[in-house]
Image (cartoon, grey):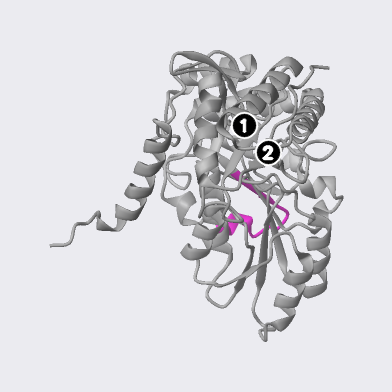
Amino acid sequence: MTSLFAKYQGIASALGAVVAAGGRNPFAVVIEKPVSSTVGIIEGRHTLLFGTNNYLGLSQSERAIKAAQDAAGACGVGTTGSRIANGTQSLHRRLEHKIAAFFHRRDAMVFSTGYQANLGMISALAGKDDYLLLDADSHASIYDGSRLSSAQVIRFRHNDPDDLYKRIKRLDAPDSAKLVVVEGIYSMTGNVAPVKEFAAVKKETGAYLLVDEAHSFGVLGEHGRGAAEADGVEADVDFVVGTFSKSLGTVGGYCVSDHPELELVRLNCRPYMFTASLPPEIIAATAAALEEMQERPELRLRLMENAARLHAGFVRIGLNASKQVSPVIAVTLETVEQAIPMWNRLLELGVYVNLSLPPATPDSRPLLRCSVMATHTPQQIDDAIEIFRQAAQETGATAAPAPLVAS
């Protein structure tokens, strides 16, 4: 009889090789204790955290922690039901109003995770007679949403509005709705989408546009509303989807829109309808973190300064860093045989980053994915750069120049 787990033999062999090459499983790292937003205890050592997506450092917000404690004391620790049953409390509605007001939108839906926000909105919006046009580098949640929908799916080249335009014009389907999905910042590479150009294609072709601002919310734009705000085209974006688990430091997801039909989507969105709603303490902490983000624009400015400092340091020591400067900075290596020892050595020297291996990477080369925080100090960034230089030199991952001199 065939084992139910036979399909996993390939990944088991690959994982075994990764562990054998480095002595540890890079996908099962345990942060034993957060010391601060930027430092955690890993394997008993104080370790600089450069792989957490905690862009503004608000996971440790005292205001959010206090709000969570108060809400749990007043409302309990869970709702025990979905949003369309008993899972909507006044806290949920107030957060939706806050999110909608922040984006200057008519309405908002709050989901239990950012993954479910993409899964739910894409699958509910695109039906069997519609077309979904997805950036080739889209997040797994976007692809999974397309699979849950019954729409016809077309991929276009990453960050290429011209290719999108050509593919839409080739469609002989004047009566079919077309939904274009792009991301503000791509989570693997840190590439920023040219939303203004995508919006122009959307207007010319009569398509709808959904922008996933998961990694650009709180990061880009004068007020932190994301790539669409930064490009000045918010009015041309039909749906903005995002998550609370990055810049706000909690968990959950949202969609905002000016379309009045968003209220009907609530009754046709399975990931919204058939899962328990977020517990009161998470809702309260998220609302508090959103308020803090709005009141402290210096966090966003410091974040981008820190991103520029880390990126410049990587370039200076000869690493192949992302082309664009954003809080996600990927260091690309040529082979897996280089990446695994270097990732392990980084952790041993006190820096945690994310290891991404083919086929999950955009161009089939391994990545050391770094994420920067507003709360990183200049010294922590310089220390991380020096540790990267040492790890690269010791593992032969690059021909590194002299050590960085801190400025």
Q: Quadrant of residue 379?
A: top right
The reply to whether the magenta stretch includes residue 112 is no
Q: Residues within 10 Å of mark 1 (few under 14, many from 20)?
A: many
Query: Can residue 376 be seen in the rendering of this structure?
Result: no
Q: Secondary structure at mark 1?
A: helix
- Residue drawn at x 45%, y 34% is 26
Above or below residue 144? Residue 66 is above
Q: Quadrant of residue 398?
A: top right
Q: Quadrant of the C terminus?
A: top right
Residue 121 percent across, percent down from the top left? 57, 56
Q: Which residue is mark 2?
A: 328
Residue 28 percent across, percent down from the top left? 41, 33
Q: Secondary structure at mark 2?
A: strand
At label 2, the amino acid type is Val
Q: Quadrant of residue 182?
A: bottom right
Q: CA distance from mark 1 to mark 2?
A: 20 Å
Residue 67 percent across, percent down from the top left? 58, 19
Q: Which residue is mark 1?
A: 392
Query: Can residue 197 be seen in the rendering of this structure?
Result: yes
Residue 292 percent across, percent down from the top left? 72, 23
Q: Residues within 10 Å of mark 2 (few under 14, many from 20)?
A: many
The reply to whether the magenta stretch includes residue 256 is yes
Q: Quadrant of the N terminus?
A: bottom left
How many discs mark residues in the rendered view? 2
At label 1, the amino acid type is Ala
Question: Which mark sits nearer the N-terminus, 1 or 2?
Answer: 2
**Magenta range:** 254-265
